[in-house]
Image (cartoon, coloured by chain):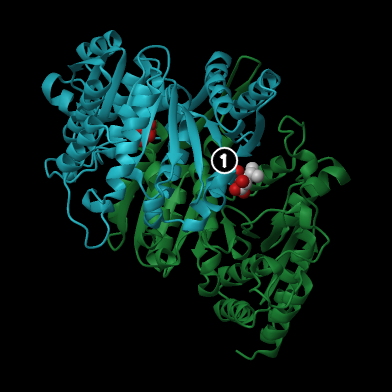
Chain colours: A green, B cyan
């Protein structure tokens, strides 16, 4: 297969982990006889510095012309605690999502047995937890009408029927491919927008008779993912609730640095680690490249390259078992591996095809 | 001291635990020579059945005429999964908060050493965690303009300067009485309303030079309370974020059934358990009365009756140590105590004043 891949490395540790993501893809290309053509483009703080825009038109064009986007992370401390700065890296992120129509953020929450001890949760609660959170990504308060003066401010949490239908379709379809259990998370006891979500989900239920659908308030869900994470299979929720819930659920695995995600929608699909740009570690060969590499695996699987995706996943599992790990997850007394060494080990494993 | 206390027992287990809350207050009155005058009033599903209104005018009057309100819980399965029902118990809750001007919901998040094993979090993370979450309770999306038709729906997350100033004042003042560390939780990188919160908090900072104030995005806070709960002293946040965060933080203690809260504002202050009405357990002498009893302790402390509050707390601690516990927190092989027995033991302890 021939794939054109837009490569957006962004800020902080982005460029370093991206190198390893691309190395994994190269190894797959070599082993399985594919052709991946990369096109780099700037975004984030990086792009503000270079062209004054965190998601420049040129980058947008590169994304639109590609079959898929591999994204790393954006964000820079120069812009932190300065939410009123005219141009901020986050605006680039939001512009990217909106212009590319990336309305469905899909975050598999998978645990790694050998890392359960890193979780803030008790291990016995997490054993066997395996679910996906689907967050609506281009609607709600993020994009509704806003106003702010010195005495008053508001944001509008607005959703239209087509926006809700398309994300629920992704959720029902995902449930069909998994254990057929969908949990719609909302605040229908208070919010009108949630009531419309719930109404539409109920209208769609008969189209998916095989799926068990239940409804949970967000406050309750924020507890249930902690007390009984194995309850869940597929969770779907709106943008703001999803922002909070996906970070909460990624963190309970004890391996936030290993979680990939996909953002799908109207145009080119995008694959990125769940973690951020960790500016403090930039250039230090410290960052874990695994989330980026697993994002590449999701990219491959998106195009039906399931053997290839499985091969990457096996390579990652093997690296963890062999204790080839970056410092934040290394076992006590284990050798120190850097971003480059972990990435190289995984790429070699893929190439040598031991699996 | 003479106090007029409005008693709103509500639904489900409400009436049972309320009896024990009142018994604790009676024991305090007897031991310390106070006079507490109770006035009962209906609310919740209960009140819908009786008078067609979950927060009737008559109840409002009783509350306004009282010095304090002791509240249990509202909610009934007949209204669940029926968010479009014309009259719902939650509306009574929201009307109560709004009409009584209860803008500050104060939730101490305290751990009980002997119950840490019940927490979903690892015990070593929680040891020493002791913080307060202050949730704005009468603004934001809960009360902003709403609209819903078949194709579109919105809610408005609106805050005015006076609303933000008064809740931040409660937060700064609370921090002054504690370890002087305030964390303002918002989403200022996306929301205009959050940016106004942050702006006003920064304006107020110089008035509280002794307080260390930091700012955290809600998604980050939802993780940090799990990975480092001891970081926090006082958290303040808006209504919707507070709904999610307070439930998350109550649940990590492993003793949700033991957490009280206060709602303070323009008129009569209200004290209530953090947990809900648990309809499945109603009438079964199963529910833990401790959160209700500790809510009574908060009530006493609100009026400067600190020795009295401390006495109630010691009685609760003693009951836990003596394994006089309801089933959900009883140790393996421990005797079964019901709502009544636990409540009676605590009241006796207060009366006998062993402490
Ligand atoms: C940086 C921020 C705007 C963004 C969001 O809130 O969507 C981030 O938290 C995320 O979840 O990708
Ligand atoms: C019942 C509901 C309206 C309420 C809220 O969201 O405020 C509850 O969850 C709470 O936290 O007291």
Ligand 1 shows up in the quarter that is: top right
Name the secondary structure under disc 1. Answer: loop
Residue B62 coordinates in the image, percent (x, y): 23, 12
Residue B149 appearing in the image: no
Residue A2 coordinates in the image, percent (x, y): 69, 74
Kindly identify which residue carries mark 1.
B232
Taking the view exactly as shown, the residue that stands out farthest to the front is B354
Closer-to-camera residue (B107/A76): B107
- Residue visible at 42% across and 22% down in the picture: B143
Please identify the quadrant where the C terminus of chain B is shown.
top left
In the figure, B100 relative to B344: above or below?
above
Residue B293 coordinates in the image, percent (x, y): 28, 33
**Alpha-carbon neighbours of circle 1 within 10 Å: few (<14), some, or many (≥20)?**
some
- Residue visible at 49% across and 51% down in the picture: B126
Query: Disc 1 sits on a residue from what chain?
Result: B
In the figure, A98 relative to A124: above or below?
above
Closer-to-camera residue (A15/B128): B128
Name the side, left or right, on which B181 lies relative to A223.
right
């Amino acid at each position: 297969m021939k794939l054109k891949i837009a490569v957006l490395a962004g800020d902080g540790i982005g460029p370093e982990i991206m190198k390893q993501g691309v190395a994994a893809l190269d190894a797959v290309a070599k082993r399985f006889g594919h052709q991946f053509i990369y096109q780099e483009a700037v975004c984030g703080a990086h792009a503000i510095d270079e062209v004054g825009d965190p998601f420049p038109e040129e980058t947008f064009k590169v994304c639109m012309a590609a079959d898929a986007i591999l994204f790393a992370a954006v964000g820079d401390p120069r812009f932190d605690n300065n939410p009123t700065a005219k141009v901020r890296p986050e605006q680039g992120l939001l512009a990217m999502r909106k212009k590319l129509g990336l309305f469905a953020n899909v975050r598999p929450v998978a645990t790694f047995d050998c890392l359960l001890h890193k979780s803030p949760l008790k291990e016995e609660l997490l054993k066997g937890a395996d679910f996906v959170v689907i967050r609506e990504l281009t609607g709600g308060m993020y994009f509704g009408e806003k106003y702010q003066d010195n005495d008053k401010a508001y944001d509008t949490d607005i959703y239209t029927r087509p926006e809700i239908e398309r994300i629920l379709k992704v959720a029902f379809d995902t449930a069909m491919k998994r254990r057929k259990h969908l949990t719609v998370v909302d605040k229908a006891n208070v919010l009108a927008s949630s009531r419309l979500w719930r109404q539409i989900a109920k209208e769609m239920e008969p189209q998916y008779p095989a799926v068990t659908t239940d409804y949970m308030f967000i406050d309750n869900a924020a507890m249930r993912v902690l007390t009984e994470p194995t309850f869940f299979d597929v969770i779907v929720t709106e943008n703001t609730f999803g922002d909070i819930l996906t970070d909460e659920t990624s963190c309970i695995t004890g391996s936030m640095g290993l979680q990939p995600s996909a953002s799908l929608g109207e145009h080119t699909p995008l694959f990125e680690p769940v973690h951020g740009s960790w500016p403090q570690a930039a250039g230090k060969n410290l960052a874990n490249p695994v989330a980026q590499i697993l994002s590449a695996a999701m990219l491959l699987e998106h195009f039906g390259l399931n053997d290839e995706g499985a091969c990457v996943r096996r390579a990652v599992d093997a690296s963890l078992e062999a204790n080839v790990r970056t410092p934040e997850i290394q076992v006590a007394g284990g050798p120190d591996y850097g971003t480059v060494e972990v990435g190289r080990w995984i790429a070699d494993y893929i190439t040598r095809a031991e699996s």
